Image: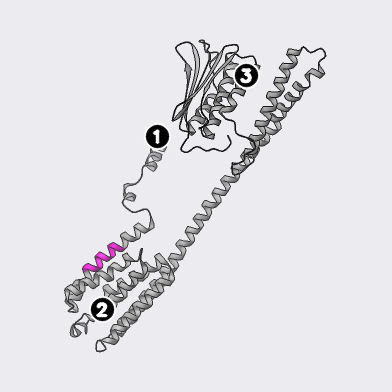
Amino acid sequence: MTPMRAKKERQKKPSRRLKLWPRDRTSALVVILATIAVVLYSVLVPLHAAAYGSPVAVTMALALAALGAPLVSVRYPNLAIILFTASAVLIPLMISRDAAAGAPWPWSVPMLIAFAVQVSAVTFRHGWRPGLIQFALGSVAGITAAIMLPSVPSGNSLIVTSSVVGGLYLVAVLFAGRLRLGEELTRERAHTAQEQAKRELVEERTRIARELHDVVAHSMSLIQVQASTARYRVPDLPEPAAAEFDDIAASARGALTEMRRVLGVLRTEDQSAELAPQRGIDDVPALVETTRRAGAAVSLSQAVSDDVSTATQLAVYRITQEALSNAVRHAPGAPISVSLTADDADVQLVIRNGYDPEGTGVPGGHGLRGMNERATLLGGSVTTGPDADGFWTVIARMPRHPITAAEGPQ
């Protein structure tokens, strides 16, 4: 393995370290907040019980509400604001006044950090208004506790808490705004790329339609005109030859009609143009008769009711058309049999014609691929190949009513 190839292989391998970290922002935020809550809880409860003389059971319950509020705020911001504000009022009141005289109050260091985390989480997740509400209510909670216990000094703690949390609130507002702006830019880029792809698709379809119109349709028009005027341009033209030219002109007119329908679809951006009635099973006899007029011996056996979806009928017609064209082109003069049957669930088409064992008569190219694509899109299948009697056989089986059939023009 070359060094360059080895480097590419290493780049293709996903990093196991990255898999351990959540990819979406919400899950990552939950992990961060849960980690902070566990760490602060393990510090706040022992600190308040030892330094402030708070009842352990009550402190555990109130600390759980205060430190769990940031996690709750991920989905329920209003409930989180209520939980934290209530806890911020009650926790400072559950103290011994003598013990609190030498410690920060009403905000201990873990509660100050919890307040900052709560304000930042609400602001980051839900915007500046809920964050501002939480900042104001939390500050009011600290002031309320200080008013209710005026004998405990608290001014410095309140000033430090308000300054620190206020600064973090501004940082959270700016950071959240930056992330939302990035998301909007990403969505705009994706929308622009989608519009660009759609425009390129329309331009390519328009180019194909232009080529078909300028080259194929023009040539078919010339064939139709020359075949229609042959009996007038060629003196003493035998009647069988004149009839043959009339059949050629009719086939050319039919091809031009189909070409105009295809061009209409290509020039329609939403691919929903209905420019002509859809071909179906009822049109198969006319298709067989056209092939007979071209000199082929074709037999038809048809036993299908009308309860067949439009998409399946169109696919049956197109597959029959392609198979007959292959048979006439690759095995001229050989007899062709067309059998069209149906059961309760599926429609089956079987076409058999002469087969050249040396390989020169085997159909190929885009025709077989197109037949397979039509059947596969409907949930069916097409099998081709020589049978035991030496006939080239096309067997197509498709559901009467495809579940995901696209019934637009094909």
Name the quarter where the N terminus is drawn: top left
Q: Which mark is residue 2?
A: 1
| Front-most of residues 104 and 70 | 70
**Residue type indicated by callout 1:** Thr
The answer to which image quadrant residue 168 occupies is: bottom left
User: Predominant secondary structure in magenta?
Assistant: helix
Name the quarter where the C terminus is drawn: top right
**Percent coordinates x, y for residue 284 in the rendering:** 58, 24
> Where is mark 3, residue-wise?
291
* Mark 3–mark 1 distance (CA, rounded to whole Å): 60 Å
Task: Based on the picture, tell me whether residue 37 belongs to the magenta stretch.
Answer: yes
> Where is mark 2, residue-wise?
90
Whether tag 3 and tag 1 are in contact, CB under 8 A, the answer is no
Task: Based on the picture, tell me whether residue 228 belongs to the magenta stretch.
Answer: no
- Camera-nearest label, 2 or 3: 3
Q: Which residues are magenta?
A: 33-42
Colour mapping? one colour
* Mark 1–mark 2 distance (CA, rounded to whole Å): 68 Å
| Front-most of residues 157 and 189 | 189
Judged from the image, the secondary structure of the residue bearing numbered disc 1 is loop
Q: Which mark is residue 178?
A: none
